Image (tube, helix red, strand yellow):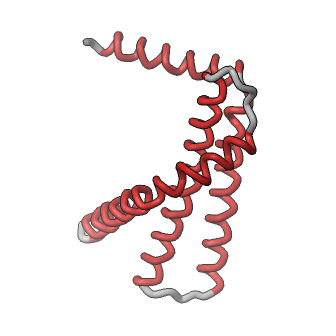
Amino acid sequence: MNVREILWRNGRIIKNAIVYITDHPKTIVPFVVNFLLEVGGLVALILYANSIMPITNLEFLLFAYVGLVWVSLTSALASLVLLRLMEQAENDEPMRLMRAFWLALKSDFLKSFPVVLVWYALQLVIYVMVFLINRNR
């Protein structure tokens, strides 16, 4: 498979996603809410970190981990809500945001919570290793 075929295939996927979003506009709501929650949470975390300055390296790592966990949990919840909305559309049910949110939070989110925490703990370790490698250069 050459580069042109890969780009063509990815272009079709993006086109199909845009068509799906325009046909079902409620599917964009979880990601808009996710963006607002992420920005609000990170701004609050940064403001709090600035209010207790100076902060130690351990506190910085703790703040970085809390920030990553916040972003990961809100992103995971938005993705689960989107999957529930798509499930409602596939079953020819009307798309109900609150029902999708409640089902995603009640059943799916609790199951995925440990996986999300472990995944972002690994991501934090990678970030720290990259930081330490780049600092020594």
Where, by quadrant of the figure, is residue 15 drawn?
top right
What residue is rendered at 46% in x and 53% in y?
A: 112
* Image: 42 above or below 29: below
| 117 lies left or right of 101 | left
Name the image quarter holding the C terminus: bottom left
* Image: 103 above or below 5: below
Q: Where's residue 86, x and y in %?
A: 61, 29
Q: Where's residue 6, x and y in %?
A: 35, 16
What residue is rendered at 42% in x and 76% in y?
A: 61
Residue placed most toward the observer, 130 or 126: 126
What residue is rendered at 68% in x and 57% in y?
A: 37
Q: Where's residue 21, x and y in %?
A: 66, 24
* Image: 72 above or below 80: below
Residue placed most toward the observer, 103 or 67: 103
| 117 lies left or right of 49 | left
Where, by quadrant of the figure, is residue 99 drawn?
top right
Q: Where's residue 14, x and y in %?
A: 53, 21
| 62 lies left or right of 89 | left
Name the image quarter holding the N terminus: top left
Q: How many marks?
A: 0
What residue is rendered at 65% in x and 49% in y?
A: 34
